Image (cartoon, coloured by chain):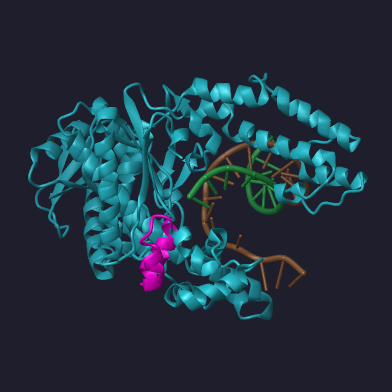
Chain colours: A cyan, B green, C brown
Amino acid sequence: MRIAVGGGPGDGGVLRPVADDGSPLGPAEPVADLAGAVAAREHASAGDVVRWVWAATGRLYPRLLRAGVRVGRCHDLELTEAVLLGHAGRFGEPRSLRAALARLEGRPVPDDKAAREGPPTLFDDGPADDIDAVVAVHADQLRRVSDTGLRLLVAAESAGGLVAAEMGHDGLPWRGEVHDALLTELMGPRPATGLRPRRLQELADAIGEALGRRVNPDSPAQVVKAFGTVGVTISSTRSRVLHEVEHPAAALLLEYKELARLYVAHGWSWMDSWVRDGRFRPEYVVGGVVSGRWATSGGGALQIPKVLRRAVVADPGWRLVVADAAQLEPRVLAALAGDRALALAAGESDLYDALAGVFGGDRDKAKIAMLSAMYGGSSGDAPQLLAIMRRRFPHAYEYVESAARAGEAGKLVRSRLGRTCPSPSQAWRDLAVQDAGRSAVRSRGRFTRNFVVQASAADWALVLLAALRRRLTAMASGLAPEDAPRLVFFQHDEVVVHAPEEFADTVATAIGEAAEEARHLVFGDTPVRFPMETAAVTCYADAK
DNA sequence: TACACAAGCGCC
DNA sequence: AAAGGGCGCTTGTGTA
């Protein structure tokens, strides 16, 4: 059973039941309390789970969550539109409900910004989603999904939308006082506005002394020039470069940069902005990366420095169940390519250990070989290692080579579930036919080579997330909402569940089952295993 | 003053 | 000769 949801004034909305082919099953019904109406229908249909059809989970669902209402399934029109457009080679075209309807009706298509601003409404901060548009676009999308075979990807993407909104709502347990103590230990107490923390100022002064003139360590141009005046020529101020420099200022600058990075990106002002009531609430953007990986629109949840994991602490009596997929991408490649030799290694718990024998007993070389194959690397030992890979794992090698050739030819490549890379720009096409465009051509080859692996890994992770969410929801039934295990973090190949300690084992089991379900749904009958390294801990930093 | 871009580095 | 994919975030810098 599906129910389409339109917007209404204030807390209201409009509901209309639709069939599984998208055709309306009854009249549209305005409701004054949308959250209440959704909750009532969600729970009324015990045997027949509702799939809620709405324009954008990210805009609508937070409102329901704030009212204490969670739903099991949805169809997100915007996320689906983006996936369908991408599959049709129309990546980046407007995806809003209004745009989708305009395209369907052959009218001029508004860009997403215009559609979102729309004509003002009296009671809302944005245009209300028209229920007739929701129903019409949904029916059209169901046809396109069926034609393209994107059913699983679209379902998983919508489930991801629910997870993202829920994680943004629930938040990651974050201990501000631990974070503060860590910063203070590393760089001194929080400075007054406009000043550097003590340790950073000391380092800046020491760098100035060592170079014989005051420099702003944050200005690469000044730093390069200052090194020049003491007879040291550096090509940039990258840490790789500075590591090779003998001059005493180099070590000071490296220490400065490391601390400054933490201070500006994840220091006290970050905490002020993003941590409230003991929770870090990031804004995830589902499908925000072309490969289907998530992005964030604030808070940098996907780039939290490892040292700060110390501040992520479970509530008293609770645990963080932390699980990451070990060496996900090479396993994905093995499964994609159906490479039996690589799949054999991927049956082991440490894939690189298993491969070491092939590369002279050196685990690091095995890793470089795999990463070079997936990223298009060609520096250092890569060529020799790739030659070994080509001989020993010919199907895996050919899979990524083929993707690279397709990209260089300007073609599209797709993930396992059908997520499709963007088309090359016209500027690229113009350049590609010239000798001078060789580097751009190679660059696109590296992109599509990586895309097939990274995007298929994202497919798997998204399906895992959906499968895990379903299990956690089942676990939560009968519990008070505040006692239920919750997904609180997701980062490409890693999940964190915050759970009462008596649920920790059950959650760990559920994660393993979800990984297995994802393996089967995404890759079918593959011998490749996707082991999860799982730990139930009090502090995130203790998980590894 | 506002903005776009580059540099640099955090995460996968 | 060198040649690694994807992001977000902040500061510095150049340009309008």
Question: Splitting the image into 4 quarters, where does residue A40 fall?
Answer: top left
Question: Splitting the image into 4 quarters, where does residue A284 fall?
Answer: top left
Q: Is residue A78 above or below residue A217?
A: below
Q: Residue at x 71, y 47 (%)?
A: A239
In the image, residue A366 lies at what x, y percent?
A: 53, 63
In the image, A43: left or right of A310? left
Q: Residue at x 36, y 49 (%)?
A: A532
In the image, A273: left or right of A506? right
The span picked out in magenta is A328-350
Examine the rendering and report whether any part of residue A17 can be seen.
yes
Q: Main secondary structure of the magenta part?
A: helix
- Give the total number of marks visible in the rendering: 0
Q: Residue at x 20, y 34 (%)?
A: A476
In the image, residue A323 lies at what x, y percent?
A: 37, 43
In the image, A506: left or right of A534? left
In the image, residue A400 lies at what x, y percent?
A: 47, 72
Name the foreground residue: A106 vs A372: A372
Say whether residue A301 is magenta.
no
Name the foreground residue: A449 vs C12: A449
In the image, residue A355 lies at what x, y percent?
A: 47, 64
Say whether residue A331 is magenta.
yes
Examine the rendering and report whether any part of residue A237 can be seen.
no
Q: Residue at x 64, y 37 (%)?
A: A261
Q: Is residue A423 above or below residue A391?
A: above
